[in-house]
Image (tube, rainbow, N blue to C red):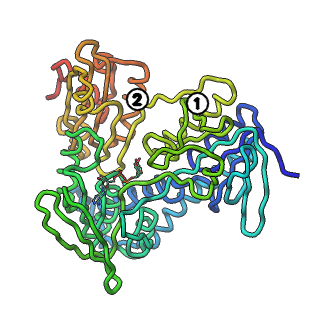
Amino acid sequence: MSETFQVVIIGGGPGGYVCAIRSSQLGFKTACIESKNTLGGTCLNVGCIPSKSLLNLSENFNKVKKNFSNLGITTGKVTLNLSKMMKAKKKSVTVLTKGIEFLFKKNKITYIKGQASFKSNNEIIVQEKNSKKIYKANRIIISTGSVPTSLPGIKIDEKIIVSSTGALSFDKVPKELVIIGGGYIGLEMGSIWKRLGSNVTVIEFLDHIVTGMDKDISIEFLKILKKQEINFKLNSKVTAVSLVKGKAVVDYTSNKTNVREKIHADKVLVAVGRKPNTEGLNLKKMSIKCDNQGRIQVDNKFQTSIKNIYAIGDVIKGPMLAHKAEEEGIAVAEIIAGQSGHVNYNIIPGVIYTSPEVASVGKTEQQLINENIKYKIGKFPFMANSRAKVINETEGFVKILADEKTDKLLGVHIVGPYAGDMIAEMVLAMEFGASSEDIARTCHAHPTYSEAIKEAALAVDKRPIHS
Ligand code: NAI
């Protein structure tokens, strides 16, 4: 007889595993089905975590090699042991994925290994190797994440033409690395391999990088990355990638001049976005509706077109971010329990973990203009922040956008040291409906990078102290 659960979650990534823990906390008999060998999904296995490990390790390598001697620290010859670095990355991943297994045990969640597909609206078939089992569930939550997309005619082989997964595991530093797409993935992966010795060229379709970010930030960020000697071909469309004698030839056309050019590469990273991962779930047979981008349609309670089936994370609309999926995982479990689970989509931070980091929350200046909202701006450069000066990390600035009349914070954008952690202060402030004056009057420890936030808030009212 098949086992019955109150809640079954398909997918053990940040959305799914967090949802499983919250469901169990709320007293539901919960199971989580995962097809890969480890829990944690893209984020822990081939995304956020391994990339942050390599970003940190490559940054250390770069610092020791380039900066230490000027600071009175003499080392011997600094060399790279890539396989050791990859081992360190793998260890970080293993510790964290095993950590989720531990949390599942602690929370008495049944961990089912295998590939899930719908048999009916409350039966799921799970296939693992040669065995097939059916599980019953009152409520089912789809949290199957996303997979990389490619361009027409360009086939990712994970050897020469790679997605982020392949680019996290090169066994040799590619001499020439071409990256298609100047978004989150392209710029993080480009930074890693540039620091480790590749000549990196990013080809981006638009005339700016990180589309959707505040324009000032995008301009400053590009300047900084160019200084780090990453090459950019903006306003350029990649049309084909061919393989010749184990190397790649990338064809691209300038959007401005229509001139066709070629660039040779040892590896090509395709980083042009991701798409919902719904293959094999049997959604069509179940009549679960998707939109024209393949995202599962849900209402404001995460309910699909079938009442007891829900969806969260990258398979539904919204930014494809682990922390957005986690919030949705918690909210949907609480909604199922009759509570008022809720996600504030206006205040979801975005972070790019380059050096320096880029972080953003709320509206960009362009969005405010488009929405005809009157605003004030406060900006403060890290060049005038004492901590940044001492540590010699003075690139970038904080930009605060506040409502012209009420002074309420509308958006905060940072390019600069530890921006990814510093943005938390402003996320919280915005959740509490703070004004820029509230931030300006809050005591910030000295000397810290966070004083740049206070100064930017003061600058909204044209009264910064240090600039
Ligand atoms: P993206 O959507 O951020 O950027 C893709 C870029 O490719 C765009 O700028 C687009 O204009 C460009 N592009 C598309 N077609 C092109 C062509 N033919 N030639 C040249 N350029 C072209 O996608 P990305 O970087 O692949 O990231 C996927 C998702 O993963 C994003 O939603 C992101 O939020 C998430 N992610 C988040 C991270 C973080 O939070 N730090 C890190 C990595 C990924």
**Quarter where residue 169 is shown:** bottom left
Residue at 58% x, 59% y is: 94
Crowding around mark 2 (Cα neighbors within 10 Å: few <14, some 14 to 19, many 20+) is: few
Q: Residue furthest left?
A: 257
Helix, strand or loop for disc 1: loop
Q: Which callout, 1 or 2, points to the residue nearer the camera?
A: 1
**Ligand 1 contact, mark 2 (Cβ < 8 Å):** no
Residue at 65% x, 33% y is: 333
Q: Residue furthest bottom?
A: 245
Q: Residue 351, position in %: x, y? A: 37, 43
* Residue occupied by mark 1: 301
**Ligand 1 contact, mark 1 (Cβ < 8 Å):** no
Crowding around mark 1 (Cα neighbors within 10 Å: few <14, some 14 to 19, many 20+) is: some
Query: Label 1 is placed on what type of residue?
Result: Lys
User: In the image, is residue 453 above or below residue 108?
Assistant: above
Q: Earlier in the sequence, mark 1 or mark 2?
A: 1
Placement of the C terminus among the 4 image quadrants? top left
Q: Quick one: 398 or 430, which is closer to the camera?
A: 430
Q: Residue 329, position in %: x, y? A: 59, 38
Q: Residue 448, position in %: x, y? A: 31, 34
Residue 346 is tagged as 2
